[in-house]
Image: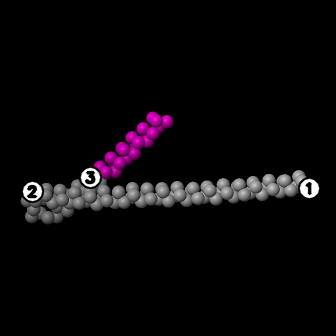
Amino acid sequence: MSSEHDVTVGIRQVEGYLLWNSKVVSARAEADEFTRQLDWLTTAQREDIEHVFVTQRLAMHKAGLLHIVNRTVELCAEYEARYARLKRRCLGLCAGGFGAAVGVCTYIVQR
């Protein structure tokens, strides 16, 4: 069981790395495309602008991913609470039905 958990954790880490790496590659490509349009920039200016562009874009992606993570945690808690309520209701109905069945059987046997 522990090795399955380790494999799952490892896969999630690789997925996370690949996702973030794709965001970095995308941000760099967008920065390059943006600064190519500004042909009057010096090399140093271009590098500075690309650095700022990439930094801001990655901050935006990080904020978006953190929002998704937080919302996922909220939804998990909400669904767990709903499941617990549903389970209690189902158990209550089953217990009520069982009690009613026992009552009917008792009535029939005593008759």
Image quarter of the C terminus? bottom right
Neighbours of disc 2 within 10 Å: few (<14), some (14-19), many (20+): few
Across and down, in percent, residue 54 comes to 22, 57
Distance of mark 1 from mark 3, alpha carbons? 81 Å
Q: What stretch of residues is rendered in magenta? A: 1-22
Left or right relative to 62: residue 7: right
Q: Amino acid at mark 2?
A: Ala
- Which residue position holds label 1? 111
Label 1: which secondary element: loop
Q: State whether residue 21 appears in this view.
A: yes
Position of 30 compared to 69: left or right?
left
Magenta run includes residue 12? yes
Q: Quadrant of residue 29?
A: bottom left
Would residue 55 be found to the left or right of residue 109 on screen? left
Q: Reply yes or no: does residue 7 show up in magenta.
A: yes
Can residue 36 be seen at all in this image of the molecule? no
In the rendered image, the vertical position of residue 70 relative to residue 8, given as above or below = below
Residue 106 pos. (x, y %):
84, 53
- The extreme front residue here reads 110
Q: Residues within 10 Å of mark 3 (few under 14, many from 20)?
A: few
| Secondary structure type for disc 3 | helix
Question: SS for tag 2?
Answer: helix
Mark identifier at residue 45? none
Residue 17's place in the image compared with 83, above or below, is above
Q: How far is the residue under mark 2 from the one under mark 3?
A: 21 Å
- Residue 25 marker: 3
- Front position among marks 1 and 3: 1
* Point 37% across, 47% down: residue: 15
